[in-house]
Amino acid sequence: NELDAPTKALIARRQRALGAGYRLFYERPVYAERAEGIWLYGKDGERYLDAYNNVPSVGHCHPRVVEAIAKQAAKLNTHTRYLFDVVIDYAETLLATFPPDLDNVMFTCSGSEATDLALRVARDFTQAEGIIVTRHAYHGTTAAAAEVSPSRGATSPRIRTVGAPDFYRSPDGNVGAQLAEEVARAIDSLKKDGAGFAGLVLDTVFSSDGLCVEPAGFLRDVTDVVRAAGGLLIADEVQGGFGRTGSHMWGFARHGIVPDLVVMGKAMGNGMPIGGVVGKSHLFDKFGKSNRYFNTFAGNPVCCAAALAVLEVIESEQLMANSVAVGNYLRTALADLARPYPQIGDVRGAGLFAGVEFVKDQSTRQPNAAAALACVNALRDKRILISTMGPYGSTLKIRPPLPFTREAVDLLIKSLGECLTQI
Ligand code: PMP
């Protein structure tokens, strides 16, 4: 299991040049050369099945996206204070995927900047500071976004955390009511402490909290609580958006709710740095009266051309329908595979986002991070790329590009089966 010399050399150069702030995946890091569709090709000449990456969401290096980028880059790319067709074409096409109340979009360069902007808009509108998030959420890396990312250890007097819905461990399965009650208590606490209540930020698939997607509709109660208290609901769709859950373009729509602000990124540009906040225009109207938002690269013509191509490919290749069909096939196969293994406590997910949770004991449901990590590393050695997620790191995170196929699922299941007998 020794790393080859070129990989070792590049790791050493990376450490020298980039410093200590970065981490690599896997005990034996992957030295990537190029990628296409659902496959990543290594410097070692091997082909790796990508069952993890949601950024190249319509497939690595999709020819239509590549062409859109190249054409626009050859024509014009600059900051956003001139009139460009492609930027407005994209804004209109994107907004058409939302309920009519969500009728404005502001562009950013990343999901973190989008969270940051949504927080500013919410605080400006409510004239309050307090924000509620789930206990292991991640919403970004800017100072304001990191403050609402308790998975990175942040705490602040103007932030309250609540338990994410955990259907697997919920005694009565009524996760929606539990969440609503906890949020109501957190709102009282923020108001009592003088921070006031600006809003609730929720990743609509709760990816950092370990993937909590069932039962669809459970966000209705909490939405009512937030509105009654005069706060805004901010949906973070960085993970759940752009057709990931298959049945709906946006994770919030699975729950039959309409947020006030929606944060997006990652899959938006298939790898180009574009994010955004979609919201109700009266919120942006108030924000725009006292703020001027200028973000040099945000929503530039090349990124918008890529993002427009992404929406076109989702539609023309029917990737949402594929996400439903292949996602169902994947979860059924995972559940069948898991049956004889007592180490697997739960298989869950929606569309092409699946979680497989390892436990030390089926009855206590005590998480087993070591087994999950061993599985991830064993799969990597079989050239299948996945990772772990959740507060304990005990859940396999399977979140491939949307053109994933049944044949790819079969390969993943066969390899996972071998890993399970191995560990
Ligand atoms: N929100 C969620 C739910 C995320 O998963 C991430 C990135 N992991 C972000 C926000 C931040 O996005 P970015 O890394 O593009 O800044």
Image: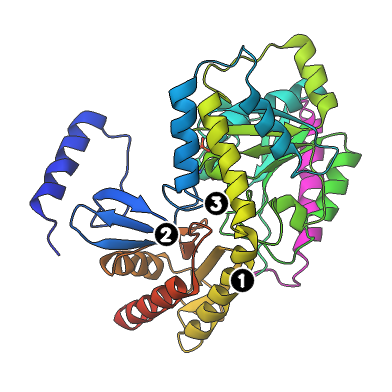
Q: In the image, what residue type sits under mark 1?
A: Ala
- The span shown in magenta is 168-197
Q: Vertical placement of 127 versus 363: above or below?
A: above
Distance from mark 3 CB to nearest ligand 1 atom below 8 Å: yes
Residue 38 has which mark? 2
Q: Pointer 3: what residue? A: 208
The quarter of the picture where residue 377 lies is bottom left
Between disc 1 and disc 3, whose residue precedes?
A: 3
- Give me the residue at 41% from left, 47% from top: 61
Where does the image place residue 156, in percent across and percent down from the top left? 61, 31
Q: In the image, what residue type sits under mark 3?
A: Ser
Residue 325 has which mark? 1
Badge 2 crowding class, 10 Å Cα cut-off, few under 14, some 14 to 19, many 20 or more, is many
Question: Which of the two residues, 203 or 272, is positioned nearer the viewer here?
Answer: 272
Where does the image place residue 186, in percent across and percent down from the top left? 76, 42
Could you tell me how far apart the alpha carbons at marks 2 and 3 are, in whole angstroms?
23 Å
Q: Vertical placement of 371 versus 241: above or below?
A: below
Farthest right residue?
228
